[in-house]
Image (cartoon, grey):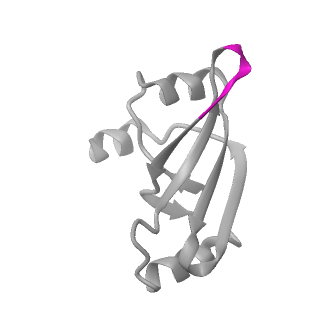
């Protein structure tokens, strides 16, 4: 993932909450909903964050599994935007986290 270097740089520079990002999903009626969440891991398959499946964002992602996200690091004068399809991690991985 080409933006992984930006994330690594933000972590190395000890930027507070370097792993926080704004996640936007589509709610009922087609309206966007945005909130700040935390990145828990970054791997070959993509970015991983966790949420309660019954939360608004969980239900919105079930109904329309696409999202956009924005990392913003003021100290680096940089933002990274990512858009794409969201998928649940395995039940085992989810259970391990919770």
Q: Position of residue 42 (x, y in %)?
A: 52, 63
Above or below, 24 relative to 83: above
> Which one is nearer the viewer's eye here, 65 or 94?
65
- Residue 29 is left or right of residue 59, and the answer is right
Visible in this render: residue 44? no
Q: How many marks?
A: 0
Q: Which residue is drawn at the image coordinates 66% and 73% (left, top)?
A: 78
Residue shown at 62%/39% (left/top)? Answer: 24
The percent position of residue 77, horizontal first and vertical second, equals: 64, 77
Quadrant position of the C terminus in the picture? top left
Instruction: Examine the structure image and report whether residue 31 is included in the region drawn in magenta.
Output: yes
Furthest-top residue in this view? 29
Can residue 87 be seen here? The reply is yes
**In the drawing, does residue 62 fall left or right of residue 78?**
left
Q: 44 or 53: which is nearer to us?
A: 53
> Relative to 73, does residue 63 appear above or below in the rendering?
above
Task: Quarter of the image for the N terminus: give it.
Answer: bottom right
Q: Nearer the viewer, residue 48 or 72?
A: 72
Q: Is residue 31 left or right of residue 88?
A: right
Counting from the top left corner in percent of width and height, residue 4 is at 61, 73
Q: Residue 34 lies in what quarter of the image?
A: top right
Magenta residues?
29-33
Position above or below: 77 against 90: below
Who's the residue at 52% across and 37% down the image? Answer: 88
Q: Residue furthest bottom?
A: 13
Q: Is residue 59 above or below residue 49?
A: above
Residue 91 falls left or right of residue 10: left
């Amino acid at each position: 993932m080409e933006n992984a270097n930006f994330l690594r740089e933000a972590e190395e520079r000890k930027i507070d909450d370097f792993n926080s990002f704004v996640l936007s999903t589509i709610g009922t009626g087609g309206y966007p909903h945005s909130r700040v969440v935390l990145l828990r891991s970054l791997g070959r398959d993509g970015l991983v964050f966790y949420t309660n499946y019954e939360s608004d964002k969980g239900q919105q992602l079930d109904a329309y599994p696409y999202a956009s996200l924005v990392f913003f690091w003021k100290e680096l004068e940089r933002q990274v935007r990512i858009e794409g399809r969201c998928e649940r991690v395995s039940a085992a991985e989810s259970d391990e986290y919770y």
